[in-house]
Image (cartoon, coloured by chain):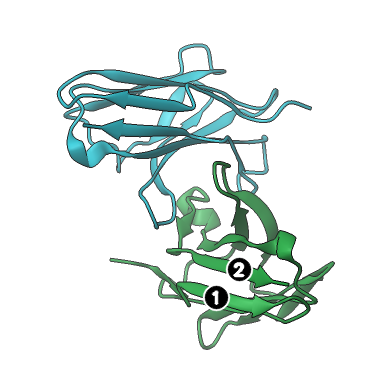
Chain colours: A cyan, B green
Amino acid sequence: EAGVVQSPRYKIIEKKQPVAFWCNPISGHNTLYWYRQNLGQGPELLIRYENEEAVDDSQLPKDRFSAERLKGVDSTLKIQPAELGDSAVYLCASSAPGHDDVQYFGPGTRLTVT
Amino acid sequence: QQQVKQSPQSLIVQKGGIPIINCAYENTAFDYFPWYQQFPGKGPALLIAIRPDVSEKKEGRFTISFNKSAKQFSLHIMDSQPGDSATYFCAASSSGGGNKLTFGTGTQLKVEL
């Protein structure tokens, strides 16, 4: 069974540029999460989707971050414009129906903003 | 406010030793306490988890000890191996809070030969 797929794996951009990350969850997993992991820290939730509905986006900086999961499967996280402080690893995770406590993480996208 | 405090930040043990990583939480609504293992360049992977109705859980060489009254839980790795060298994160969530995971800051474990 394929795991959570993320692309790109690495991205280097200049500040003020836009960037987008893509995630394809495990087949059948209806809950999708985006986390940000700063260097030397644990992941922090940015947004959680149940199917195509964002049910928790309280930690998403909405002035520059946006996310979508149009068909309830894959998802895109966008930053526009990026700031130096956005440099981090962006992790996507998914969980199966009725098993939200067990989250499977993708390998992440390492973003460097210069 | 950091709701899950993890220590130590880093740990070096000899092969066969028993590293112990500790976590403390504040939110009494937490009812699920997983440990994740993360290797460089990889996402965190669920290692073992416990709910507060038991005080200990073992899976292979990994054991969680849970103290509900002290609001603390710990991970013990028996007969540690160099392949266990990784970063370990404790986490906590509440079913009433949408199972949102709150992670600790991580412990970098190195197991030396």
**Residue B65: where, in percent of width, then height?**
67, 80
Height in image: B15 above or below A62? below
The answer to which of A1 and A107 lies nearer the viewer is A107
Q: Which residue is mark 1?
A: B11
**Residue A108: where, in percent of width, then height?**
50, 35
- Whether residue B74 is visible, yes or no, is no
Subunit bearing disc 1: B
Callout 2: 10 Å neighbours few (<14), some, many (20+)? many
Callout 1: 10 Å neighbours few (<14), some, many (20+)? some
Q: Secondary structure at mark 2?
A: strand
Q: Residue at x 31, y 33 (%)?
A: A112
Q: Which residue is mark 2?
A: B110
- Which amino acid, mark 1? Leu
Q: Residue at x 47, y 21 (%)?
A: A8
Answer with the quarter of the image where residue A77 lies.
top left
Q: Residue at x 28, y 66 (%)?
A: B1
The answer to which of A75 and B12 lies nearer the viewer is B12
Subunit bearing disc 2: B
Q: Secondary structure at mark 1?
A: strand
Q: Which image quadrant: the C terminus of chain A? A: top left
- Which amino acid, mark 2? Lys
Given the current orientation, which residue lies at the most extreme front position? B113
**Residue A105: where, in percent of width, then height?**
58, 39
Residue B65's tag is: none
- Whether residue B55 is visible, yes or no, is yes
Residue B95 horizontal side relative to residue A110, left or right: right
